[in-house]
């Protein structure tokens, strides 16, 4: 039962804002470094490749809301994709971040494949991230640069990040939290309508 009164709605959201987030994208694009930068505010310049998947929980403060995220950081190396293990990680995801590397633009070619895996296993919203901006020699994009991708997969937003300088990192997680808040409210409003 979802409260219709505004005061109760705020209280209810405090209790209910818990969601699954998946970080996907090719090997070495910077997923683990991004989550590490966000959680610890520090840069690791030589991570080991992620084997299978790694799991974190993190609370994102968004104004009056506190959003509890369960984040799955997938190992992007081809051998893990070939194992066909990822369906279960995407299942139930509210937000999927698909990352490519601004210094290796061929990593953009895999974005549709990651997006397919995500949308085939869940009702997830998608965010696109271009990583390693500090090494990109000024190469930059906007969401409109990816018209074919956004038409097909409806990416909510696009961010460019550098885990070395921290640029853009908080923006990604703020977008994640905002999507979780909006999706939770929308879902409950729909359930209320069905009951009325
Ligand atoms: N200069 C710079 N280096 C980065 C950045 N992000 C990641 N790196 C480096 O890129 C390498 C790979 O980063 P990871 O975070 O391990 O990549 P990943 O996407 O998790 O890779 P898999 O676990 O194999 O899927 C590491 O040596 C990082 O230090 C960045 O924003 N700037
Ligand atoms: Mg990794």
Image (cartoon, rainbow, N blue to C red):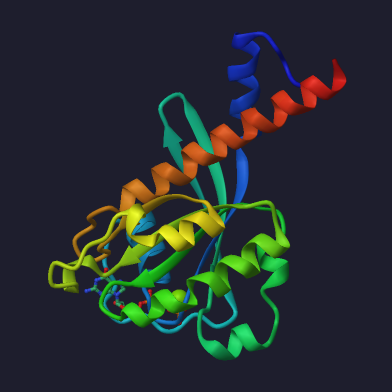
Classify 183 as above or below 6.
below
Whole-percent x, y for residue 37 in the image: 32, 60
Q: Residue at x 39, y 71 (%)?
A: 100
Whole-percent x, y for residue 11 in the image: 61, 19
Q: Residue at x 73, y 68 (%)?
A: 88
Q: Nearer the viewer, residue 181 or 11?
A: 181
Q: Would you say 153 lies left or right of 1 here?
A: left
Q: Nearer the viewer, residue 69 or 136?
A: 136
Q: Residue at x 79, y 20 (%)?
A: 193
Q: Would you say 133 lies left or right of 87 here?
A: left
Q: How many marks?
A: 0
Whole-percent x, y for residue 186 in the image: 65, 30
Res 1 visible: no
Quadrant of the image occupied by residue 166: bottom left
- Quadrant observed for ligand 2 in the rendered image: bottom left
User: Split into 4 quadrants, where in the image is the C terminus?
Assistant: top right
Quadrant of the image occupied by residue 31: bottom left
Classify 4 as above or below 186.
above
Q: Residue at x 68, y 51 (%)?
A: 123
Q: Would you say 127 lies left or right of 137 here?
A: right
Name the residue furthest left.
Answer: 137
User: Split into 4 quadrants, where in the image is the N terminus?
Assistant: top right
Whole-percent x, y for residue 170 in the image: 33, 48
């Amino acid at each position: 039962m979802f409260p219709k009164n505004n005061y109760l709605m705020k209280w209810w959201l405090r209790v209910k804002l818990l969601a699954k987030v998946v970080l996907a994208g090719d090997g070495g694009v910077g997923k683990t470094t991004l989550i590490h930068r966000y959680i610890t505010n520090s840069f690791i310049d030589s991570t080991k490749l992620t084997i299978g998947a790694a799991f974190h929980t993190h609370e994102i403060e968004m104004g009056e809301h506190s959003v509890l995220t369960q984040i799955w950081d997938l190992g992007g190396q081809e051998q893990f994709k070939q194992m066909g293990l990822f369906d279960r990680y995407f299942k139930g995801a509210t937000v999927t971040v698909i990352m490519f590397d601004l210094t290796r633009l061929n990593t953009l070619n895999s974005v549709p494949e990651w997006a397919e895996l995500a949308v085939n296993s869940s009702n997830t919203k998608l965010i696109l991230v271009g990583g390693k901006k500090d090494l990109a020699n000024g190469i930059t994009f906007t969401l409109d640069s990816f018209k074919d991708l956004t038409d097909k997969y409806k990416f909510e937003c696009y961010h460019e990040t550098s885990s070395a300088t921290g640029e853009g990192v908080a923006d990604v997680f703020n977008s994640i939290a905002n999507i979780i808040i909006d999706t939770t409210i929308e879902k409950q409003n729909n359930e209320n309508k069905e009951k009325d």
